[in-house]
Image (spheres, rainbow, N blue to C red):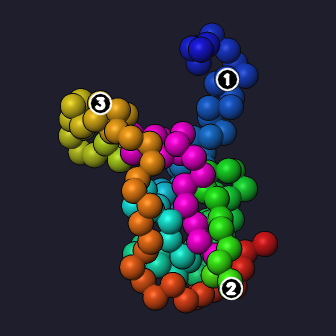
Amino acid sequence: MTAIFESRDRADAATEKLKIFAQPQRLMILSYLLRGESSVSDIDVATGIGQPALSQQLAALRQADVVKTRRAGKQIWYDLADDAARLCVRTMEALLTDQPDPQQVSQAVAAPASPGKKRATGSGTAGFAKIL
């Protein structure tokens, strides 16, 4: 793998990816999704973001391929897109504390990529319109 300092293109791509994570509401959503697949209404209850901001941020995350969706009837479920997204979010949670612990950061990086599939415990009813 090429180190970022060796490639301007790689540095530009990394900067664009970091911009997706550098928004407080998006980071809250991603942190919540580490716990597993969730509905829009469950994400809203857990984060308190509310509409229309929640729909806007979920759309941005989906467009950036950081989250994926699954339709079940009228309900849309959101989850982190892949193991790379899980690794990024876990590592940020470990690093971005007042006093990062190197051991916790190492554990976050070494942890299994996928959480056990867990359904959100909320009502599961659609709280908002589908985001196009």
Above or below: residue 103 compared with residue 17:
above
Q: Which mark is residue 110?
A: none
Query: Looking at the picture, how far across and down is residue 113, in whole percent?
Result: 44, 42
What is the three-letter code of the residue carrying label 3?
Answer: Ser
Mark 1 or 2: in front is 2
Query: Which quarter of the picture shows residue 71?
Result: bottom right
**Residue position marked by numbered label 2 in the rendering:** 74
Q: Which residues are magenta?
A: 76-91
In space, the residues marked 1 and 3 are separated at their CA atoms by: 24 Å
What is the three-letter code of the residue carrying label 1?
Answer: Arg
Q: Is residue 100 left or right of residue 117?
A: left
Above or below: residue 62 compared with residue 41:
above
| SS under mark 1 | helix
Above or below: residue 106 compared with residue 71:
above
Q: Is residue 47 left or right of residue 4?
A: left
| SS under mark 2 | loop
Query: Looking at the picture, how far across and down is residue 118, in whole percent?
Result: 41, 66
What is the three-letter code of the residue carrying label 2?
Answer: Lys
Query: Looking at the picture, how far across and down is residue 80, in whole percent?
Result: 54, 55
Q: Is residue 88 left or right of residue 1?
A: left
> Mark 1 or mark 2: which comes first in sequence?
1
Quarter of the rendering occupied by the C terminus: bottom right
Above or below: residue 52 compared with residue 12:
below
Mark 2 or 3: in front is 2
Query: Which quarter of the picture shows residue 74?
Result: bottom right
In space, the residues marked 1 and 2 are separated at their CA atoms by: 40 Å
In space, the residues marked 2 and 3 are separated at their CA atoms by: 40 Å
**Residue position marked by numbered label 3 in the rendering:** 106
Report if residue 77 lies within the magenta region. Answer: yes
**Residue position marked by numbered label 1 in the rendering:** 10
